[in-house]
Amino acid sequence: MKKIAFGMPCMPVVLGWLVVATVGCTTETAPVQDDETILRDAAETSASAIEAQVTEVKREPIVDDIYHYSFLVKVGNTPNARIRVHRIVREDAPWRARSVAHAILLLHGDFATFETNFAPSLKSDAAQPDQDLAVYLAQRGIDVWGLDRRWTTAPKDGADFSDFADMGVVQAVSDAGSAIFFARSIRGMTGAGRDPLILGGFSSGAQITYLYAAEETQKAPGQRQVKGIVPIDIYAKVAPEDAASKQVACDNAAQERDLVAQGEVDSDNSAFFQPVGELAASAPADPSPFYDGYSNRDVLLGFVTQTYQFYEPKPKYHLVGGIFKDGAPTELRYAPEALISDWLAFSPPHQALVESADRDALWCGEAPLPLDDHLADITVPLFYLGAAGGFGDHGLYTTTVVGSTDVTTHVVRRLPVENEPEDFGHGDLLYAADASTLAWEPLAQWLLAH
């Protein structure tokens, strides 16, 4: 088993104060003023403490006094040794975030980034700020941070995959620790304090949330950075009665590890996820290039409402709930179709296959495993948010395995159990029109109480 290090000796860094435009947003160059200088110094010092280098910073407005900051951080010398740290927060003045006590760092899921999962209005014309979980939390006085994993930074064309084989869960957990340290350092140097944060994640990001919290239990209390966790619709351990789900994980892990052994390290999101989303939006009625006899819209609806046909971590698992006629989906039940198509269309082009293999191996539980099992040692408060049509109730078992005594669970269920195949889906927790009422409000209340 590999040990994970979250902090390393300081080294000199240089901050390139670069500003890059993003889709649909106006990006501002940092003014020459004290507030900008404070943030610059905080970013430099925070990066230095983790042997990293901040190479890009940007600030952009979202709505009212809420702004989005992002920091591209070089964390090594390999081609894709970069993470992007995000912050969505209310400002007191330009480049001066409001000092608030409550903070969370969120980890995105597969075929996604922090923006596409938690702040889609920054990417998609189909989304408004009131459809962003991160904005919702910021409006309620929570300092929202996020991390884009290394594979999200690889370019669509001409990517060098020579370091993708190292992008497993060990590295993902370590990078999460670096991002938390970076966020805490900036908060501390800009007046918000260096207290531990809540760590949360959606889907695979939630699994990494569990893994980070478990690994951190092996550190001395004074070295721990997380005071609570929010896994959103996932399990970290498969329940004994879910034998079929465990077998799916074992089969997937074996297949993925075999591909990695053959040198296949990239899950190419530009081969399926991106075009499915793009074509459903641009040419919905045209024949699909993926499935004969189906339109581009048919394929989108089929994939997101009947995801279990492709991937089934629990019976009838689906990304979003649909409405069906004669067994075929005709429309989405809860989420705007344009927003779901953009979720796929704005997928990062590449993803590390070894991370997927590691995560499936941990669900399978058969050696060799990339990390030891320390779930039972987790004692920090936990809030589990699930969707009946996603992992839902199947994620509850993990909340009984951890050692936490402060455990809150909230599974969104809109339909009777017999209609679960059409119920609130995995992604509906982020994209449904009423997600703010059904899912985000109880989450915000828990965060403000912790």
Image (cartoon, grey):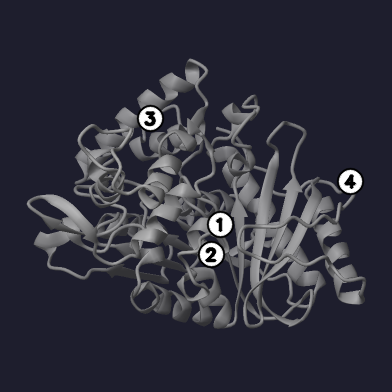
Camera-side residue of 72 and 64:
64
For the residues bearing labels 2 and 4, Cβ distance under 8 angstroms: no
Cα–Cα gap, marks 2 and 1: 7 Å
What type is the residue that disc 1 sits on?
A: Phe
Mark positioned earlier in the residue sequence (4 or 1): 4
Please give the label number shown on residue 253: 3
Cα–Cα gap, marks 4 and 1: 28 Å
* Residue 74 appears in view: yes
Mark positioned earlier in the residue sequence (1 or 3): 1
Please give the label number shown on residue 119: 2
Cα–Cα gap, marks 1 and 3: 25 Å
For the residues bearing labels 1 and 3, Cβ distance under 8 angstroms: no
What type is the residue that disc 4 sits on?
A: Met
- Percent across and percent down for residue 94 are 79, 78
Front disc: 1 or 3: 1
Residue picked out by circle 4: 11
Q: Quadrant of residue 115?
A: bottom right
Residue picked out by circle 1: 114
What type is the residue that disc 3 sits on?
A: Ala
